[in-house]
Every structure is written in structure tokens, then in C-alpha cells.
Amino acid sequence: MSLPMSPDEHLKQVLASFDESVNPRLVEILRSAVKHLHEFTREVKLTHKEWFAGIEYLTATGQKCDEVRQEYILLSDTLGVSMLLEMINYAASEKATEPTVFGPFHVDGSPHRKNGESIVDQTNDTGEPMVITGAVKDTNGKPIAGAELDVWQVQSNAMYDVQEGADWRNMRGIFTTDAQGKFEIKTVRPVDYTVPDDGPVGNMLRAAGRDKWRPAHVHTVVSAKGYIPVITHLFDSESPYLKNDVVFGVRESLIADMKNGKCHYDFVLDPL
Ligand code: BEZ
Ligand code: FE
């Protein structure tokens, strides 16, 4: 009579079932995922009831997704995986501007705007006017002319334009640096806002006693020919949520003074 199989032997058998000659990268990912899933299941001694609660949770997460709502990405964001992805895939040196999460509210094809133009297209916005000035430079401090800043931010009602389901757009624009590498963006001071919490992610945050807030920020993707683009934010230094951003995106180097209607920040890009 043979001895009963141990969990280690069982894991070995599952790992061996993947044929790496078919697709080596896929098998590498699947084997690692299986290994960690088995370790996790053993570590917490998962019960049948808890396993099924997890199945129901993932099912509900999928059911909450549609063309505009991606609850799985929100789950990835709030578990810190999206930020980790940015950290491990950003090839620039430590001298370059730090990246942070992209988030779900970017829209392709924002209007190109002249330096000094406003991104506030809806005149009923009640925010405090603010001008963001600065330059885009290389890691030697040389200004980069013709760099693009694709900028977007939440409206003063704490909603992104796309969350309102309308066909108009607000708080978006693409700016180009001048011959001195400088840019100037008219906007309003950003506000703190919460991630959508009417789905499984909101349930997880409440059940775990976590905050649902993002500290006030302005998003930008800064790019220039011959340089590594950076997906980043500028965070308002006075936000009370800098220490507990629900998506773990805050970096000290991205915190800026937004008082008195002014914000100044220089972005630094690494060559490709
Ligand atoms: C955002 O900053 O727009 C965002 C990022 C992650 C999740 C939700 C919103
Ligand atoms: Fe945002």
C-alpha cells in the first residue's frame, strides 16, 4: 500500500502538469500562480466556506464589470498590485520623475491646448483657480522642448467627467512645452475623492476597515521623442489622505504645494 500523498507532492504533480514546451512564459506564470495559491491556501488553512465566499466574491466582481466599469482593475488598484506593476515595469533611473497609477479615467484624444490655456471647460465648476507651471527636463537638467503633457483631473464635484455618463468632456488637455521646455496649465485646485464603492471592492474596503479616499491630485503622462514616458500625478501637499491613499499611489517626490492658486513642478525624463 502506498503512503497518502502530502500537500507538497500534490503541488509537484499540479506544477508538472503544465507543458512548458507549448508556451514557456505562460507556463512560468501559471506555475508561479499555482505555487502561491497553494501556499496561501495552506498558510491560512482555508475552509470550504471561505473558499466558496472567495468564489462568490470573484463572481460578483466580474458581474460588476461593463464597458465603462472595470471592477477587477479597481480590485488590483486597491490591493496595491497596479502600483507594483508601475514600479517594476518603469525602466527609468532614480533621477527621473517617479511613476504612479494610471487609473481608469484617462480618455484618449484630449484636446491639444496652448500654454496658459484652461482645462476647465464646464463653466459651472466651483473650484479654486490654480495655475500649474514648470518645465520638462532631461536627467542632466537640459530643458526638453516639444514634450507633451497629457493632463486630466477630477472635477470639483469629486467626479470625473466620464463618471457622469455625458458626452461632454471637462478637465482634460494635452500641453506642449515651449523652446525653454516650459509649460503652463490653468485649472482649479484638485479635490480629494473616493473610488467607486458601490460594488465588491467597496464591500472589501468596508469589511477590512479601510479608507476609500484618494488624495487630491492632477494626473499627467509626460512624453517626449527619444525619452521614456512617465505616467504620474502631482499630489496636493495639504490633502489629509496622503498617508492612506486607497490605491497606494503617493510618493514623496510627487507631493507639490498647491496653495494660493499656484503649483510649480519640473518633470524629469530619462532618455530611451
Ligand atoms: C484615479 O486616480 O483616477 C484612480 C486610480 C485608481 C483607481 C481609481 C481612480
Ligand atoms: Fe484620479
Image: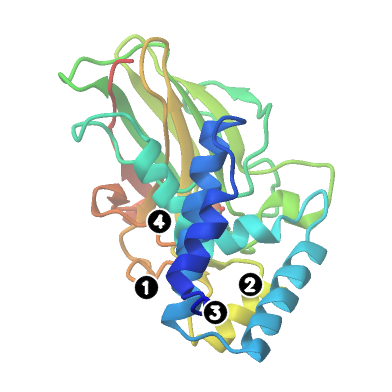
Q: Is residue 204 left or right of residue 227?
A: right
Pointer 1 with pointer 4, Cβ within 8 A:
no
**CA neighbours of label 1 inside 10 A, class few (<14), some (14 to 19), many (20+):** some
Residue position marked by numbered label 2 in the rendering: 201
Residue position marked by numbered label 1 in the rendering: 240
Residue extending farthest left? 140
Task: State which mark lies toward you, 1 or 4.
Answer: 4
Gap in angstroms between the C-alphas marked 3 and 1: 65 Å
Task: State which mark lies toward you, 4 or 3.
Answer: 3
Gap in angstroms between the C-alphas marked 1 and 4: 14 Å
Give percent across and percent down for residue 81: 47, 56
Task: State which mark lies toward you, 3 or 2.
Answer: 3
**Residue 1 circle label:** 3
Q: Is residue 22 above or below residue 145?
A: below
Q: Is mark 4 within 8 Å of ligand 1?
A: yes
Can residue 187 be spotted in the picture?
no
Question: Is disc 3 placed on a helix, strand or loop?
Answer: loop
**Residue 186 circle label:** none
Residue position marked by numbered label 4 in the rendering: 249
Residue extending farthest front? 1
Give percent across and percent down for residue 104: 63, 49
Disc 3 residue type (three-letter): Met
Give percent across and percent down for residue 119: 59, 38
Which sits earlier in the primary sequence, circle 4 or circle 3?
A: 3
Which sits earlier in the primary sequence, circle 4 or circle 2?
A: 2
Gap in angstroms between the C-alphas marked 3 and 2: 49 Å
Q: Nearer the viewer, residue 146 or 16?
A: 16
Which sits earlier in the primary sequence, circle 1 or circle 4?
A: 1
Question: Is disc 1 placed on a helix, strand or loop?
Answer: loop
Question: Is disc 2 placed on a helix, strand or loop?
Answer: helix
Which sits earlier in the primary sequence, circle 3 or circle 2?
A: 3
Disc 1 residue type (three-letter): Pro
